[in-house]
Amino acid sequence: MLSALELEALKLSAFIAIIAVSASIIPGIIIAWIISKKNGFLASILNILVYLPLVLPPVVIGYLLLLLFSHNGVIGNFLYENFNISVNFSWKGAAIAAAVVSFPLLVRSIKLGFDTFDSKIEEAAYMNGASKIDCFFSITLPQVLPSIITGLTLAFARCLAEFGATITFVSNIPGETQTLPLALYTATQIPGTDQAALRLVLISIALAFISVAIAEILAKRANKRIMGNPN
């Protein structure tokens, strides 16, 4: 059985992951489309910026977020002075950290969908009088739905696993910022909590396995529906 603290960490991890992924969906689709369809200097710079979190140490990301969102930071000061919103040492900051580190996985998966989409289908729709916006929402987006589903699920799993950026940015506060990985870290630092650490390890592995399995199942179903075979 999970202790109350461990259960709270599990619930907080799921909540933060849902918030982070939900906030990333629309920007992820837009940026993936730009990177896939547009050429030029600006698209190249955007591509580099999107993928930076994949190669930067998570501690660096957390520290950069701390500089930006602290009360003295550019974004943090604006939010606090104008909206009385503080993300320091709160679940909001944890959600921001999770969104940043998982965003490249989301964009990469969706971009692959746009890359493999046959543009001749769009051209045929244009010739029949469809506008670009109608074509995007009625033809393009449904065709890349399997890639979107895969990206969302992988991003969600990455959010559940986020550790370095979160602990650097918003610390390790039980009930507020202590997600599942941070609770596991705490358990490994306290003598006599080996069983608790093992439980959290097993839960983390199970969640990762379930997330990947769900991504595969949903993507296959979406592909079958697109191909006209719902069974």
Image (tube, rainbow, N blue to C red):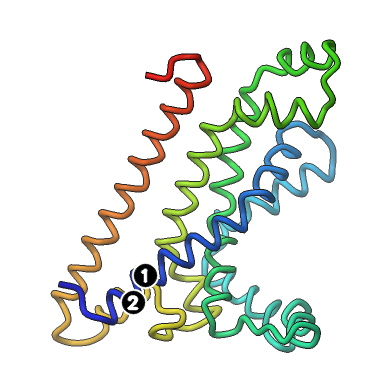
Q: Is residue 115 above or below residue 9?
A: above
Identify the image quadrant of the N terminus.
bottom left
Callout 2: few (<14), some (14-19), or many (20+) C-alpha neighbours within 10 Å?
some
Q: Is residue 127 toward the left or the right of residue 95 in the image? A: right
| Image position, residue 167 (x, y; %) | 47, 78
Q: Is residue 103 toward the left or the right of residue 34 in the image? A: left
Q: Is residue 45 above or below residue 121?
A: below
| Image position, residue 139 (x, y; %) | 68, 24
| Image position, residue 106 (x, y; %) | 56, 46
The residue sitting at 79% across, 81% down in the picture is 78
The residue sitting at 42% across, 19% down in the picture is 230
- Pick the front one: 96 or 226: 226
Q: Which mark is residue 11?
A: 1
- Pick the front one: 153 or 109: 153
Q: Amino acid at mark 2?
A: Glu
Callout 2 secondary element: helix
Callout 1 secondary element: helix
Q: Which residue is mark 2?
A: 8
Dots 1 and 2: beta carbons under 8 Å?
yes
Q: Amino acid at mark 1?
A: Lys
Q: Is residue 152 above or below residue 184?
A: above
